[in-house]
Amino acid sequence: MFKYRAEITKGEEIRYISHLDYAALIERAFCRSKLPVNYSEGFNPRMKMAFASALAVGVTSDAEYMDFELVKPLCQPEVFERLREALPPGVELLRLCTLDGKHKALMAEVDLAKYDIFVPLAGTFLEAQRAVQDFNAVREFTYERVTPKKKREIEVKQYMKLPITVSSREDGLFMTMAIIIKPSGSIKPGELLRVLRESFGMPVDEQQALIYRRALWGQGKPLIELIEE
Amino acid sequence: MVKLEPKILQAVEKPARYTGHEWNAVIKEHACVDCTFALALPDVYEVGMSNLGLKILYEVLNQRSDTAAERVYAPWTDMEEKMREAHLPLFSLETFTEIGKFDFLGFSLQYEMIYTNVLNMLDLSGIPVWAAERDENMPFIVGGGPCVYNTEPIAAFFDLFIIGEGEEVISELVDVFIHWKTAGRPGGRRGFLLRAAKLDGIYVPSFYEVHYDEAGQFSSIAPLEEVARPVIYKRVIKDMDTVRFTEKPVVPYLDIVHNRIMLELFRGCSRGCRFCQAGISYRPVRERTQERLKELSRTLVDATGYNEMSLTSLSSADYSCLSGLVDELLHDFHEEKVSFSLPSLRIDSFSIELAHKMQQVRKSGLTFAPEAGTQRLRDVINKGVTEENLLTAVSAAYRQGWKSVKLYFMLGLPTETDEDIIGIAHLAKKVVDLYTAIKGRRGVKVTISVACFVPKPFTPFQWVGQNSQEEFRRKQQLLKENIRDKAIQFNYHDARVSFLEGVIARGDRRLDHVIYEAWKAGARFDGWTDQFHYEFWMSAFAKCGIEPEKYNQRERSLTEPLPWEHTTPGVNKEFLLREYHHALKEESTEDCRHGKCSACGVCPNLGVRVVDWGDADV
Ligand code: SF4
C-alpha cells in the first residue's frame, strides 16, 4: 500500500459542520477524484483514512491532517491535483507528502494545538486582561466537564503549553492559546473560554467566539513536516 | 444579502442547515439573469434536500443561462425565533438573497400537514400570506407537487399552481415571465397571470369563483376570465429518456433523510390499489431504458461521490428490466464500492432474491405493505396479494438471513369489520411463527405499522366517510388487545393528525381561514409529532365557524359536485365510480402495465401511453 499525508483546511464555508460530517465529505471527495484509495477488508469496506484530531462544530482550521492509502503508487503532483479538484468549497489542500516506511498514527503524533480566537467583549478590556492574567498565574485549576453521559473533573493547567495572550481588537478580544494534547486527553478552547468567564470573571459570551485552529504540531513541528525529510 | 452573525448560528441546532456552500450548488450573479426562482420545500433542510422533484427542477432551471434557481427550506423553530428577534428575512442558500427579492417562490407541496409552514415561510420573507394582498414588487408564489389534486384549501395563498409534472412547464412559465418582463410588465401582476393561465397545466385560482348551495355545500367553480379553462389537466412527461433528470445534485454536508443518489427508474404505478392517490395521479407507467439508467448512474456517481444509490419509483420491483439492471450496476460499480437499495419491495420471492443480491451485508429490516389483515379486505382495496404470497416472501427472507420484518397496514378502510382488524394481529403472528418453524428458534422482530385511512381526491374512495377519531382509537385498542406475542411491535398513527389530514385533503376554499388561524395561533411543522398542537386547529375551526366533520366524515353522494375536480390527473370519474363498485363487490382489477387497459382515461385524455420495456423483448 502507498501512504500519503495531507494538510487541509476547514474554512468559513463549513465552519458549522461536525467532525463526522467533515470526514464524510472528504470520503466523497476521494470518490469523485477516482484516486485508487484503499479500503478495509470485510463485508462493510471502509476507506482507510485517519485524522489527527477532531474539530468541533463552529471551529475553522488551516491545520487539519489526514493519512490515506492508495493501492497504486501515483506521483505526488497527480494525487495533489486530483484530490484538490474534488474537494468542496471550504476545504483546501495545502500540502501533500508520501509517507514511506513506518509511521505512528497521526493521533499518536499530535501533541500541540494552537488557536486564535476572536470574541466580542461584554465589559472592559481591563477586566478581560485581568481574568487572563489571573488564569495564567494559578498553578492548578479544576474544571468539571459535563457531557450528556457523565461528569468528569479535569485539571486544566496541565494542558497549557504557553500562557494565554489577549489583546484588544475592534469591539472584542483577540486571544491565542497553545494547548497540549496528551494521549489521555486535552481541553478545548471553548472550554477554556468558559472557565475564564465562569471562574475568572472575563466579560465575554463564549457562545459568540470565533475559534480558528492555526496549527497542529508534533514534536515542535507541523504534523506534515514530521515526515518531510 | 442576508448576513448571519455567529451569535445566531452558534445558538441554534445544526447551523449548517442555513450556511449553504454545498458541492454542486449553483451560484449565479442575479444581475446577469432575467429570472430568479427560489425553490422551497416547506419543511426542515434534511427533509427538503431529500426531495427528488425539486432536485430535478433546480437543474432544469439552472440549465438556462437566463435563470438562477436557488433553494430555501423552513427554518427550524429555534432558528425562526432568532431570525424574528434579529429581524432577519428568509434567505436562499446559494447567494443568501432575501426571498422577497426573487421573481418566483415555488413550494413543493408534499402533504397537507405542512401547509402552515408555507404561510410561515411567506411571513418570514415579508410577503403577505394572502395572494390578493401582494404588490407589484413581490415574487409570484407557485405551488406544485402531489397536493395539487386538491389545491382549494390553500388556493388563496398562491398566485398560481403547476398541475402535474413540472420539468417542461416550469421552463415555459419562465419564458412567459421573461417576455412579460421585457415587454415592460404590461398589466402588472394580473397581466402576467393572464399570460401564464394560457399555458397547459397552469391554474390561477384567483381567476375562478366558487359557488355554494343553500345547504352550504360546494356546488360549482366557474372561470371569471376568458383564459381560465374550466378544467386543468396535469402535465405529463411522454418520454422519460429524453427529459432532463438530475445529473449534478447538490451534495449536503449534513446527514439528510435520503443521503444518497436517487435514481428514478420509472414514473407511475398502475397496480390499482384503490386507496392510493399516487397510483392515479402519476399514471401512466413510463419507464426509462436500462441504457439510460446505466448512463445516469455513472454520471451521478461521478458528480456526487456518493457510494450509495437508491433505485426509486413508486414500486421499484416492477421495473421490467430490474434484474438485468441490478446485475449491471453491481458489476459496473464493484470497484467503487457503491451499494444499491430498493426503497419498496414487492411481496414475492423475486424481490427477496434481489434485495439479497443487493445487500450482501446488512440484513436490515425488510418492509412489506399488505395494507389489510384479511383477504376479503385486500380484495376490496385491490391489493393483489394473498397471505400465501406474503408467507412465501417472508420465508425466503428468513432463509436469506433477515431477522426483522416491518409490515404496513391501514385501519378504517371501507367495509372494514372487527374481523379484518383482528386479521392484522393473526397475520403478524403467522409471520412470527414462520420464523420459529424455519429456524427452529425464536428471535425475529416483526413491526406492524398501522396508519389511519385518509380518503383522498381522485381515488375510488373519494366519496367515503372517514372513521371518527373515537372509532380509530377503538380499533387501535382492539388490535392492541389481540397482539399477544412479544416479538410483535405495534406502532400506530395519531388519529388526530389523520383526522386533520382527512379534513384538509377533501376540503374546499373555506378552509383557508382555518389554516390561517391555526398558523396565527402558532401551528408549524404539524407533521412533526413533537410540534403538533391539535388545540390550535380546533380553536381555528371554532373561530371560523366550520365543522370539520362535514369534510371528512360525511359520506358524499356519488352525484354531488366535488370541489377538487377542476385540477385533474386526467382520470375519468366513471372509472373511479366503476372501481368503487368493484371494491364493494370485492372484485379485482388488472394492472394495465401488462394486462388490459382498464380505461381509466389518463392515456387518451393526456395523449400519453404506457412505456414498459418488458414487452419489448418478448
Ligand atoms: S388509460 Fe388504460 S393504459 Fe392508460 S393508465 Fe389508464 S388504465 Fe392504464
Image (spheres, coloured by chain):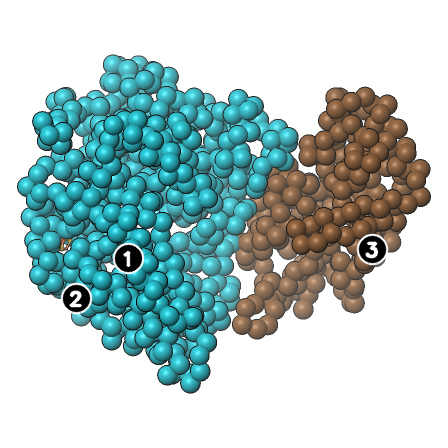
Lower sequence index among marks 2 and 1: 2
Measured Cα–Cα span from mark 2 to mark 3: 69 Å
Which residue is label 3 attached to?
A182
- Residue under the image location 68 percent in, 34 percent down: A207
Q: Position of residue B107 (x, y in %)?
A: 35, 35
Does the closest atom of ligand 1 sit within 8 Å of the Cβ of label 2?
A: no
Chain B shade in the render = cyan
Q: Residues within 10 Å of mark 1 (few under 14, many from 20)?
A: some
Q: In this rendering, would B79 be left or right of B449? A: right
Instruction: Tell me whether marks 1 and 3 sit on the same chain.
Output: no
- Of the residues tagged 2 and 3, which is closer to the observer? 2
Q: Position of residue A179 (x, y in %)?
A: 83, 45
In the foreground, B304 or A153: A153
Q: In this rendering, would B470 be left or right of B13? A: left
Give the numbered dot on residue B226.
none
Measured Cα–Cα span from mark 1 to mark 3: 60 Å
In the image, is residue B211 above or below residue B379?
above
Judge whether residue B56 can be spotted in this image. Answer: no
- Identify the element where label 2 is drawn: helix
Chain label for disc 2: B
Q: In this rendering, would B174 be left or right of B599? A: right
**The C terminus of chain B appears in which quarter of the rendering?**
bottom left
- Residue under the image location 34 percent in, 44 percent down: B497
Q: Position of residue B61 (x, y in %)?
A: 36, 36
Q: Give amino acid for label 2.
A: Arg
Which residue is label 1 attached to?
B475
Q: Are marks 1 and 3 in contact (CB under 8 Å)?
A: no
Give the numbered dot on residue B376.
2
Q: Give amino acid for label 1.
A: Lys
